[in-house]
Amino acid sequence: MLSSLLATTNLPKEIETIIGSEKYQQLIELLASYRVGMWLYPGVIKRKIGLSTQKTYEILQSMENAGSLESYYELYCSSCQKTSGIVVRTFNELPETFECELCFSVLPSIENAFLIYKVIDVGMH
């Protein structure tokens, strides 16, 4: 479980400083269901914990720096509000444009890319 990472590293103090102890406990409960290979969407943390976008990304960046997450870019159709299913590891891998398979809109990738995270380590070593 991803929450194990927070119990076995220095991250608890860092994250608790960012969001406070009450929200930190809510975060632990939320992360308990995440396993290696699962996608973690910043919007889920933001909504469920009630954090600002800035604080959400600070937490995720801390967890990525600790080696538990990897960031990816996911392309999202702003016309029909659906994910394209296209996920790339680095910004440089983004195509200039992409076509939505659902509504066939051709969209610029940079304006329609969202940062998501993949769980790569749950801190069980």
Image: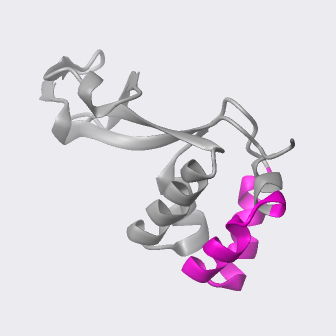
Which residue sits at x=79%, y=46%? 123
Left or right: 58, with 103 as reference point: right
Name the spot of residue 11 as percent of width and height, x first.
68, 65
Left or right of 70? Residue 97 is left
12 in relation to 31, above or below? below
Residue 115: image location, x then y, percent? 39, 44
Above or below 94: residue 39: below
- The colour scheme is one colour
The answer to whether residue 109 is left or right of residue 41 is left
Examine the rendering and report whether any part of residue 78 can be seen: no
The number of numbered badges drawn on the structure is: 0
Residue at the spot 72% in from the left edge and 39% down from the top edge: 121
Q: Please say whether residue 70 is one of the residues in the magenta stretch.
A: no
User: 52 and 6: which one is in front?
Assistant: 6
Name the one closer to the observer, 81 or 31. Answer: 31
Q: Which residues are magenta?
A: 7-32
Question: Looking at the magenta stretch, what is its main secondary structure?
Answer: helix
- In the rendered structure, the answer to whether residue 115 lies left or right of residue 59 reads left
Indicate whether 29 appears above or below 35: below
Which residue is rendered at x = 23% and y = 38% of the image?
112
Q: Position of residue 15 (x, y in %)?
A: 62, 72
* Residue found at x 34% / y 42%: 114
Q: Is residue 81 visible?
A: yes
Residue 97, quarter of the rendered image: top left
Q: Nearer the viewer, residue 59 or 103?
A: 59
Image coords of residue 117 (percent x, y)? 52, 41
Q: Is residue 28 magenta?
A: yes
